[in-house]
Amino acid sequence: MRSGVVIFPGSNCDRDMIVAIRQITGKTPIKIWHKENNIPSLDLIVIPGGFTFGDYLRCGALAARSPVIGSIKNHISRGGTVLGVCNGFQILIEAKILPGSLIRNKKLLFTCRETTIEVQSCMKNPFLSGLKIGECLKIPVAHNEGNYFAPKDLLKQLKEEGRIALKYSRQKDYENNYNPNGSIEDIAGILSNNGRVLGMMPHPERAINHLHGGTDGLKLLSNCIEQIIG
Amino acid sequence: MEPRSQLLKINNNEYLAQQKSKIEDALEMGLTKDEYNLICKKIDKIPNMIELGIFSAMFSEHCSYKSSKKWLKILPTEASHVIQGPGENAGVIDIGENLAAVFKIESHNHPSFIEPYQGSATGVGGILRDVFTMGARPIAIMNALRFGTADLPLTKHLVSGVVKGIGGYGNCIGIPTVGGETNFDKSYNGNILVNAMAVGLAKKDRIFYSAATGAGNPVIYVGAKTGRDGIHGATMASAAFTENSTEKRPTVQVGDPFIGKLLLEACLELMNTDAVLSIQDMGAAGLTSSSVEMASKGSLGMNLNLDLVPTREDKMTSYEIMLSESQERMLMILKPGSEETAKSIFDKWDLDFAIIGEVTNTGRLILTKDGFEACNLPLEPLVEDAPEYNKPYEIKTDKKVFKPSDLKTSLTIIDILKEIFKNPNIASKKWIWEQYDSSVMGDTIFANGDSDASIVKIHGTEKKESYGKGLAITTDCTPRYVKSNPIIGGMQAVCEAARNIASSGAKPLAITNNLNFGNPDKKNVMGEIVGSIKGISEAASFLSTPIVSGNVSLYNETNGKSILPTPVIGMVGAIEEVENSLEISAKLDNVLIALGQSHNFEVGWVGCSIYQEIVNKKYDGAPPPINLEDEKKVIEILLELNEQKLLTAAHDISDGGLLTTLCEMLFKYNLGLDINLPSNLINCDSNDPLLQSWCFGEDQARVIIATKDIKKVQLILKENSVDFFILGKTNSTSNLNLKDITTISINDIKKLSEKTIPSMMSMEQ
């Protein structure tokens, strides 16, 4: 398993992601600096969370123009796997690797808390295929711009192609705050058209041991790595 | 009348350098006539305007502690585990395994009132820099906030801005904000308090200090460029507010957490090499205080060429460059020959890097700009001769002891409990806490009220059989107690902090304090300062938790009205195996025991309590007394019980008394309890004053613990002759029953508690 974690100026979940992958694979992922345009062949590239370039202009907008994005696109065109978490998801959208947009949270407040996300019935992909459809995972979010939006046509297309991978899930009937950001149809994560790229707002790397209050993030990441190794 | 506005018009450095100051200039800059005369005498000349500006910053209360210095000296600062006490950028303590915890608390009160977002954001940025300047990676941010009356529109504006600002900086730089306290009182209506604390982790043998070394060594400026923001901020922070204070908005600094993050990474990367000899962040009074402090601590001198300072704006004068408080800047002394290595690291992070001068052995600060000597001052008077005042003081204490029967009320226990949780001081702070990223870095175990102290795991100390070590952090102060009796109030703040650390399962180790008071020229305010420092000293000595860093913020008054005295205690403790740390929430079938609670109940302390405020619409009288022996005993027994893994939760009894604490322990898992009552209370009515004093009295040195092993716990408590009272066993009913007297729905109270602050902050109200 060869993996790499991309680091931009302002990335701040890079270490957490490296710890999580090392915990699963026993191997430390390589660090990929954003100015690199020639990265080695890897099984998995992760774009971690943070505030790349201060999130100035728009979240992920400046990072999406870094040299490394070209290499990531090459990696994807070769069928490579990419996971973007939080700001990583925002970068994938700004780089037009994933469609739609992530706008300000509905309440216009930064939100850090645990959420429950549900695995959707979706196209074949290496991230969730080992998990059951309808399985719920408790994974925290921490973001200001996680409100996923897609115009009607795109939303229809995403559904038809089975690209909606994760949704925030209501656990109790009276729970009306289960969607932390107001995203359309409670979307928490979507796939690329070949199913090899997943962008998600919740942070699986922050739920990897019992002291975090749960290990569902570890479950998601381990499954993903197992699927990739095959 | 601002000196700044006059000087901005004079962009001629030659003129500035030659312009002799007058006494009027000194007065405008906040110096007194005596201080001006002293300066002239000590430097043996009449200072020019730049030199005077430098003196005014260094002599400001903020930099010189001139009113409090005499009293700060009585604080205990030493212990075997103290590596660095007060006087550096932050305090450092030994936490074993060659690791050190580096921490400090600092206020940003005045700027946050004027511009809440930037004021609080730069407060966080500044305290983080203080920590990583010492070579430590910051791992947690805490805060202590005080706002005015909850229903004022201005309060909502300030709460909203301050919370966004704290989150804005901490979330972006990627260091978890793990807790703190937020309180409301009318005394803060015109002067809020924003105290930010940061804790970092360093290798014990890789701590960096600020004293300059080696004449001839290069002085390096790194980080953001210098702009015209925050000029004379330290002087502003040392004056009282008037109605026109918002006009001071241009003296508020502007923060850039993104640059802060780059600076953090670049500095830590450079510190991994052997290039850095000494380093100091540019905080209050910017380049002035950093250069003066570095040179004077090393008993050396410094020559700086201000033409080489990276500036954001054209034609900045030497006065502006020296007194700007632009953020995210550092001054370093490098080992000669390592400039290239250092520069390549800062280039990588796209940060400015400029060699702006050199260390000398002249003992003088010499600045040049545009080919003119802008300043030539001996360093000693700037630091050594800053005045130390022995201001007159009077420690006023309210001695009236209230008996429960003095507080007759028709309110029932449920009525009072509801009022307590409608009070934003007690209510859930979830609305605030969710705006802070508390889980970034992946090491947060308990944050934001999950435990009495916030717990972060120490990265890299994991062992086969354990998740590793943890740090426990808390901030505490009960200003109404301090107002009634400064000495007891000071002691109480230390004791509550220590109790909180112990309730989380950790051993209390050391303190950083933030002393927020009104105008020290008033006798009673000076009395509050002296009294609370005495109280803090006594308790900190007794509990072996020395003060290793801190900050004093005076002149917190508006139009002559002072804030409540607020000496905030930030305490750090350590736990060997972080999985043993305790949350406040009891689990099903746990027995709850009140430690420090006598079985033979006579009377609960109601004076100065939240309960008294609800019944009498005001709090007064003597605060609950502090018995240091009892406090120590409770802390020691908590640690012993937890070491034997006999506890499942613990929560100290503080604001709102025993019943409030109990409710908070039952909220998370929606549990119930049939509560035991002392025999003399069983037949009371719900509005009986004695029963209510048992429920809501604020007697100190008490903690409620939860256990699955009542027999063992009881045995240990008896062996150690600790007072205790068994409250009962948790059940799944979600009802708290007080015999036949009353039944409290835990769910209802929890909902009420979680609704208080959101509805206060919503515009619909």
Image: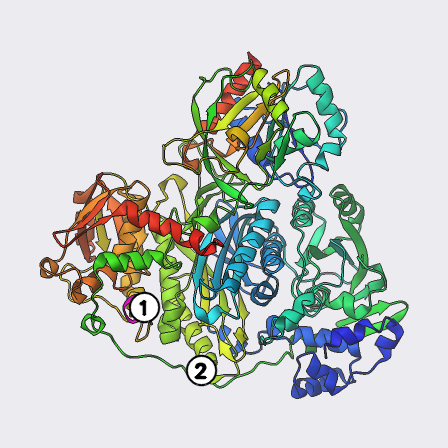
Image location of residue B476, percent across then percent down: 42, 60
The label number, if any, that marks residue B613 in the structure image: 1
Q: Nearer the viewer, residue B102 or B12?
A: B12
Q: Quadrant of the N terminus of chain B?
A: bottom right
- At label 1, the amino acid type is Glu
| Residue furthest top as drawn | A230
Measure the C-alpha gap from mark 1 to mark 2: 23 Å
Where does the magenta region start and end? B613-617
Q: Which comes before the other along the chain, label 1 or label 2? A: 2
Q: Chain of mark 1?
A: B
Q: Residues within 10 Å of mark 2 (few under 14, many from 20)?
A: some
Q: Quadrant of the C terminus of chain B?
A: bottom left
The label number, if any, that marks residue B372 in the structure image: none
Q: Nearer the viewer, residue B408 or B278?
A: B408
Residue B231: within the magenta?
no
Q: Residues within 10 Å of mark 1 (few under 14, many from 20)?
A: some
The label number, if any, that marks residue B524 in the structure image: 2
The answer to whether B80 is drawn above or below residue B26 in the figure is: above
